[in-house]
Amino acid sequence: MACRDSVGSPYEITLQLHRDGALYGTVGERCGWLLTRLARGVAEARAGQQEQWPDPDDRFPDDEELFAFRYRTRKGIVSGGELRCQLRTIPIWVPERRGPAGEWKLARRAFLEAWGGGGVGMRAVLTSAELGAFVDGLVAEAEECLGPKSGNSSRTPIEGAERSPGRR
């Protein structure tokens, strides 16, 4: 959903979470710039070389918490949902092709958790490729919501907001 300035022009987004077609929560007021930055960070981490994480699916930006979006009322009360993404290192058993032997491998995954206003939660465990596709999809949908690029600027509204996240 687009956030609008005092003259009604869209400049940022707020996420509406839906589950089974029903509104589940509203979170992340003015989060488009952060999602754009995260999408770029995931792409750069996957493209780079990290000695500790040779598999590109294990490569993420360095922050343990990639984002945490909550809904706050005008009085600052947290309600209406939460969407957060944290990195965790988990062990995965890799069996040998023959026999019961194998070895443990460490993998990094993004744990994407959504909580509705009623306290019901959902979780997805994502590789960096899956997280990148999810965030790219959110950014693309936000760009559609905000409308076409204006004037001579080659930047989209969210990319422009990245430099000034406090714009109102």
Image (tube, helix red, strand yellow):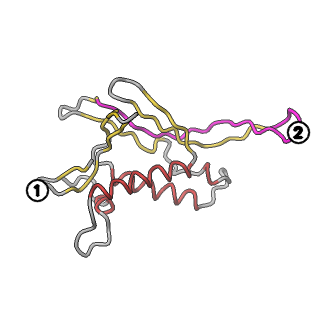
Q: In the image, residue 96 lies at what x, y percent?
A: 83, 40
Crowding near the residue tagged with mark 2, few <14, some 14–19, many ≥20 C-alpha atoms within 10 Å: few
Q: Which residues are magenta?
A: 80-102
Name the dominant secondary structure of the magenta segment.
strand
The residue at the far right in this view is: 99
* Residue 14 falls in image quadrant: top left
Q: Earlier in the sequence, mark 1 or mark 2?
A: 1
Q: In the image, residue 20 lies at what x, y percent?
A: 40, 34
Judge whether 94 appears above or below 129 on screen.
above
- Identify residue for label 1: 7
Q: Are marks 1 and 2 in contact (CB under 8 Å)?
A: no
Question: In the image, which disc is placed on residue 158?
Answer: none
- Identify residue for label 2: 98
In three-dimensional space, the C-alpha distance between marks 1 and 2, rounded to whole angstroms, equals 68 Å
Q: Residue at x 28, y 54 (%)?
A: 165
Crowding near the residue tagged with mark 1, few <14, some 14–19, many ≥20 C-alpha atoms within 10 Å: few
Provide the secondary structure element on which disc 2 rests: loop
Q: In the image, residue 50 lies at what x, y percent?
A: 63, 56
Amino acid type, residue under disc 1 in the picture? Val
